[in-house]
Image (cartoon, helix red, strand yellow):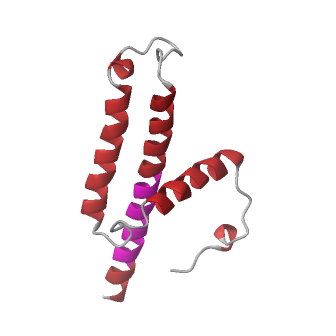
Amino acid sequence: MKIPPEFELPVSVRVDVHQFSSMMEIELKKNDHKRGYKDGHPLVVFAKLIDEIGEIGNILGDQFYAWEGDKYGPFKKSDYDEIIRECADVGNLAMFLMLSFFEQRAKAMRG
């Protein structure tokens, strides 16, 4: 697939995107020894993505349902760190899902 010129490197990246993608890379490197999902079937990758989102929900626990305005309630530092790591995992799996669909589309177009 040809990348449109506006998406070719170097591209200007927002600070938030840079922070998020940096955390994604940190998590990817920590898991380099594991079998990856990059070449996985989209449904398998999607199932893992839902599982990772559930892990964030487990950490939030009752706080998720006790939302009051802008207050989440008291989290431990380790909760914040774990949520950040899990969000990076979700981002990585969303990326793998997108790449999987790129591959599936390319196969379909080849016939």
Q: Residue at x 71, y 47 (%)?
A: 15
Residue 7 appears left or right of 109: right
Say which quarter of the image contains residue 70: top right
Choose between 19 and 76: the one closer to the eye.
Answer: 76
Vertical relation: 109 (above or below) 59 = below
Vertical relation: 2 (above or below) 21 = below
Quarter of the figure with the C terminus: bottom left
Report x, y in % for residue 77: 51, 27
> In this picture, which residue range is highlighted in magenta?
91-105
Which secondary structure class fits the magenta region best? Answer: helix
Vertical relation: 17 (above or below) 84 = below
Say which quarter of the image contains residue 101: bottom left
Report x, y in % for residue 100: 37, 69
Q: Residue at x 39, y 69 (%)?
A: 38
Count of number-bearing discs: 0
Choose between 102 and 23: the one closer to the eye.
Answer: 23
Report x, y in % for residue 42: 30, 64
Q: Residue at x 38, y 27 (%)?
A: 60
Q: Residue at x 40, y 56 (%)?
A: 93
| Residue 88 is one of the magenta-drawn residues | no
Say which quarter of the image contains residue 107: bottom left
